[in-house]
Amino acid sequence: MAKLKDEGISVGLAVVIVGDDPASRVYVNSKKRACEEIGIYSEEYALKGETTQEELIELVKKLNEKDDINGILVQLPLPRHIDEEAVINAISPEKDVDAFHPVNVGKIMIGNYDFLPCTPAGVMELIAESEIDLAGKECVVVGRSNIVGKPMSMLLLHKNATVTICHSKTKNLPKVIKRADLVVVAVGRPEMVTGDMIKEGAVVIDVGINRLENKKLVGDAHFESCKEKAAAITPVPGGVGPMTIAMLMKNTVKSAKLKAGRK
Ligand code: GUN
């Protein structure tokens, strides 16, 4: 960051949160803390739950024009009276560090992109760091959200994996999971993937983060049973979560560099 400052490049992130969802508050705080730690300027806009869609879009448009802001992150989910798609569409694609805007989604599809969505990008970093070669591997993605499941599948495909996407209507999910060399679970159902469902030596990547009634945080995979059979498994908390934040920082820095005409 000091090097960028020397070159006259400043980096700024705006984080917008609407309402008082406790999980969103925790995520937003983590994002702000990461900015502080690495020297990215950040602004928080904490809006009341009753904020109208028009007011929120007005703020996004103001941030699009703000010179000291390179990244705009509107924390999802938004209150039900706000159309998320309309808000995402209002974010300038150049400042869309979540890579949720249709322009950025389209670029990812083609494989020629500036930003990757933070969670799938973080998962790909973990896979690369672990020196897992994905070419020809059976990868099963459980969950088809726009934030994780769909882009995740595309990134795995770009690495020449054979990709299966599962969802709530998938027939015989355990059978599909069983054939996976690598399984990514992102459905938000506590401990739904259990050790008996996975192949011996599979890699399990757990994107879920669920709070049980006893306040314990658990993933979408049952860690203890999966650990017995998996070659590698990401813990919750402390696995994919910190990677998501790291990728947000990376995208924000990249946005500032692109604006300055640097790659
Ligand atoms: N809600 C859950 N994950 C995310 C994310 O990666 N970005 C935003 N903006 N909201 C989220």
Image (cartoon, grey):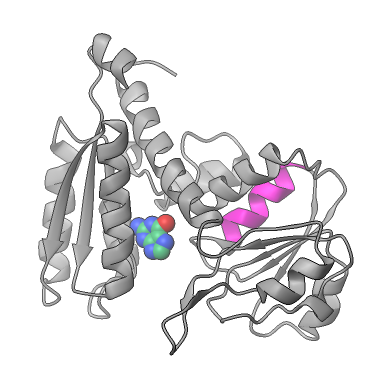
Left-right relation of 238 to 231: left
Is residue 98 placed above or below 52 in the rendered structure? above
Residue 8 position by quadrant: top left
User: Is residue 74 in sight in this rendering?
Assistant: no
* Quadrant (top left/top right/bottom left/bottom right) for the C terminus: top left
Find residue 74 and report its horizontal and vertical position in percent: 27, 57
Can I make out residue 209 in this image? yes
**Residue at x-position 35% and y-position 42%:** 93
Query: Observer-nearest residue: 199 or 67?
Result: 199
Front position in the image: 248 or 81: 248
Residue 94: x percent and y percent?
Answer: 33, 36
Please tell me whether residue 13 is drawn above or below residue 174 in the rendered image: above
Q: Residue at x 14, y 55 (%)?
A: 45
Q: Is residue 81 left or right of residue 129?
A: left
Magenta stretch: give its range: 150-159
Q: Residue at x 40, y 49 (%)?
A: 98
- State the predominant SS element of the stretch in magenta: helix
Q: Quadrant of the N terminus?
A: top left
Query: Which of the two residues, 82 or 98, is positioned nearer the viewer here?
Result: 98
Q: Position of residue 190 (x, y in %)?
A: 56, 81
